[in-house]
Amino acid sequence: MDGAALSATILPLVGVALGTAGTLTGQYLATRGEARRHTDQRAAETRAERKEAIVGFLDAVQRVEQVVDDRMHGRSPTAAVDDLLHSLWLSKKLLELVCSFDLASAAHRYTSTLHDLAQSPSIAGPSAAQKECRAEFMEAARRELGIDGRRLYPPTGTGTPSGR
């Protein structure tokens, strides 16, 4: 076999091998990129689901805190306390389904504290436990949503921002 016949046989085979390798590499890269996009999309959906649960919980908290605030100022609550507490506990349970153990634990402590305060016949002033539980929950929620930065609420004992 001479060189021309050998090249006529080998070069097409090399071309086919290179073409196959190129096609497989392209498919691998496309599949890897699609998998990364799918992972990113799923992470965004999970974050949105968690954020929705947190917002629902905070909405229920706000309504119960209004009852506590009304009682603290000697006013009768304008809403049915039992219904508000039911909504609060339900939103806490929904939060437990989609969020981390740390956030669910903080939500449970906050809910229990608010429940006790809302059931109390009279309240002298803002509860330190309520403020502490609120701060703990808010910081856990920020971590859950991937928000970095300084704490919004100083650690216990250094004072907490007032308001709801």
Image (tube, helix red, strand yellow):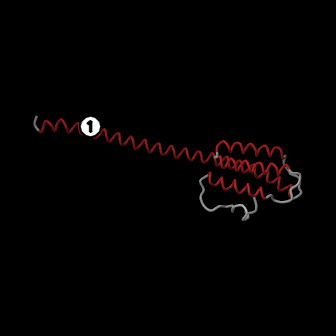
Direction from residue 139 to residue 82 in the image, left or right: right
Image quarter of residue 156: bottom right
Look at 69% across and 48% down and name the residue there: 105
Q: How many marks?
A: 1
Q: Amino acid at mark 1?
A: Val
Q: Quadrant of the N terminus?
A: top left
Q: Eyeballing the image, is 114 above or below 21?
A: below
Mark 1 burial class by Cα count in 10 Å: few <14, some 14-19, many 20+: few
Image quarter of residue 73: bottom right
Look at 70% across and 50% down and name the residue there: 106
Residue 71 position in % (x across, y down)? 86, 55
Residue ranking furthest to the front: 157
Residue 6 position in % (x across, y down)? 15, 37
Q: Look at mark 1 in the image and give the residue it sits on.
A: 16
Direction from residue 109 to residue 149 in the image, left or right: left
Q: Quadrant of the C terminus?
A: bottom right
Residue 64 position in % (x across, y down)? 79, 51
Look at 53% across and 45% down and name the residue there: 41
Q: Eyeballing the image, is 136 above or below 99?
A: below
Local secondary structure at mark 1: helix
Front residue of this view, candidates 95 and 27: 95
Residue 2 position in % (x across, y down)? 10, 37
Residue ranking furthest to the bottom: 158
